[in-house]
Image (tube, rainbow, N blue to C red):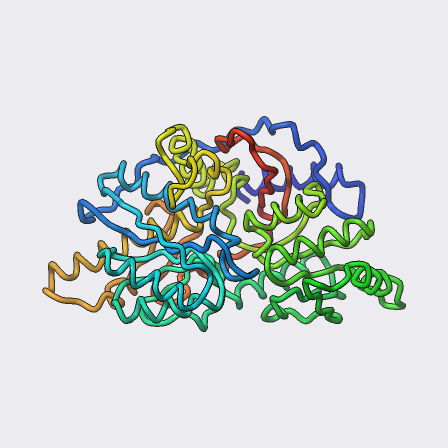
Amino acid sequence: MSKRHWIVIAVAVVVLLAGGGGFLVWRNASATPKTDPAPAQPVAVAVPGAPAELKIGVLVTLASRPGQGSEWKFAAEGAQVAAERLTMGGVKVTLVTVDDKGSEAGAQRAVEQLADQSVVGIIAASQGSHLSGAVKAAKKAKVPLLLPYEPDPKLLGDLAWATGPQDSAIGAALQQSLTAANLKRTLLIDVGGGTPDGVDPDGKITFEPDDDPKNLVKVVTDRTKEKKPIDSVLISGPAVQQAAVVQALQGADLTLPLYLTPDATSPAFTAALVEAGGSLSTSLASVGPDADDAAALGADETGKAVSAFLAATRMLAGDPERTTLLGDQPFAEVADHADTRSHDAVIAMAYAITAVTTRQSQDGSVDPETAIAGLKLDHASGLAGPALDFSGSGALAPDGVIGLRSSDQDLGLRPGASDPAPRLIWFAAP
C-alpha cells in the first residue's frame, strides 16, 4: 500500500473519531494538518514537438438551469493554470473564452465563434444536454472538442472526447462504495439525475425544486422505521438540488450515510449548501477522480502531480494582473475553485494538437481524429489527475473513478481569496 493511502486512512480515522457514530464528521475546520504536501513535479509542462503557439477555446456557462453547466464555471479556471504551465514550458498558450448561456443554440454559436477565431481546439467546461449544440458545431468545423465535466456518452461523437467520469463508471463506483460499506438498502432521492447506471436502490423518491422538504424528511424517516429499514441515502441530480436535500436531512438529524452523484463535487454544491443553512462538517460520500487537494499530501506520483498543480495555482493567484477566464474579476478571487479536470483537459489538448501537427508534417494531411486516437497521457505528461487514453470517446478509464469523502478541513494549500468562501475538499475513501 502506498504512503499516500496510509495518509488517507489516517485522515479517515481522525474523521471517525471526531464523528462519534452516525454521519462521519470532521469538526476542527480551523486547524491545518501538519502533513506537508508531496514535493511537486516541475511546475512548467513541456510538450515535445509542440507548436510555439496555441490558441485554445474555452466554452463556459455563466448562468443556466440546474444541471446545464453553470455549476462548473469557477472550476473551469483550472484551464488558466494549465495554460500558464504550458507557457512556462515553451508553448505560448492563449485561451479564448465564450459563454454559451446554457442553451443548445448558445453552445452551437459559442463553438462557431471560437472556430471563427481560429482556435485549434475547444474545452467545453460545462455540462448538460445543451452541449449537443457544441458537439455538432465542433464536428462541422473540424475542431477537436474535450469535455471534462459531461458524463453522458451519448453526447460524444466525431472529434469529441470526454476526459472526466462517464455515467457507467460513476454508477459502478457508487455501487462499489455502497457494497464496500456493507450498505444493502439504499433509498434513492432523485432530484433530476435519475438512477445511476448499475445501482439497484431499495426504493426511489422523486423530489422537485418546489416540493416541501418536510414531506421528504417524513418519507425518509418512515423508511428508517420499517421492519427492513433503509441503511443509506443516495441523492442524484444537479448540485443545487442535492444541496437542498442534504440540508433538509441534516435538519432532521438523521444518522444515515449520504451518498451523492459527482455534481456535488462542484463549487456550486458547497455554495448552495451554505446558502441553505446546511453544515459542511458532515462527511458526505461521492465518486470521482482522486485529484483534489488532499491527494497532494501523498508522496506518490499523484501527490507530486497535484502538488505541482497547486503550486502553479498559487503562483498565478499571486499575480494581481491575472483575471478570470472572462476577465470580470482577479484570478485570486476564484483560485480556490480552479480544479484539475479543466487543467488536464487543456494539457491534453496541447498534446492532441501536437499529435495532429506532427502527423501532418510527416504525411502532408491527416484525419485529426485518427491522430488523437493514439494519444495516451499520464502524470509524466503533466496531468494532475488520472491517466487519459484517447483510443475511445471516454478517455478516462473506469478505474480512475473511485469513492470519495468530503471534509471542510482547510489544508492550507490554496492561495485564498481576500474574502474566502467555505470550501469542501474531497479525498479518497479508504
Q: On the rendered image, what quadrant is the N terminus found in?
A: top right
Q: Is residue 293 above or below residue 123?
A: above
* 155 or 171: nearer the viewer: 155
User: In the drawing, does residue 52 fall left or right of residue 15?
Assistant: left
Q: Residue at x 38, y 45 (%)?
A: 325
* 364 or 267: nearer the viewer: 267
Marks counted in the figure total 0
Position in image of residue 207 (x %, y %): 71, 66
User: In the drawing, does residue 105 fall left or right of residue 280?
Assistant: left
User: In the drawing, does residue 133 fall left or right of residue 191?
Assistant: left
**Quadrant assignment, res 81:** top left
Q: Residue at x 36, y 59 (%)?
A: 146
Q: Residue at x 55, y 39 (%)?
A: 294
Position in image of residue 245 (x %, y %): 71, 56
Position in image of residue 283 (x %, y %): 69, 46
Q: Is residue 135 above or below residue 34?
A: below
User: In the drawing, does residue 30 fall left or right of residue 383?
Assistant: right
Q: Is residue 13 above or below residue 117?
A: above
**Quadrant assignment, res 227:** bottom right
Q: Residue at x 37, y 50 (%)?
A: 378
Position in image of residue 137 (x %, y %): 32, 68
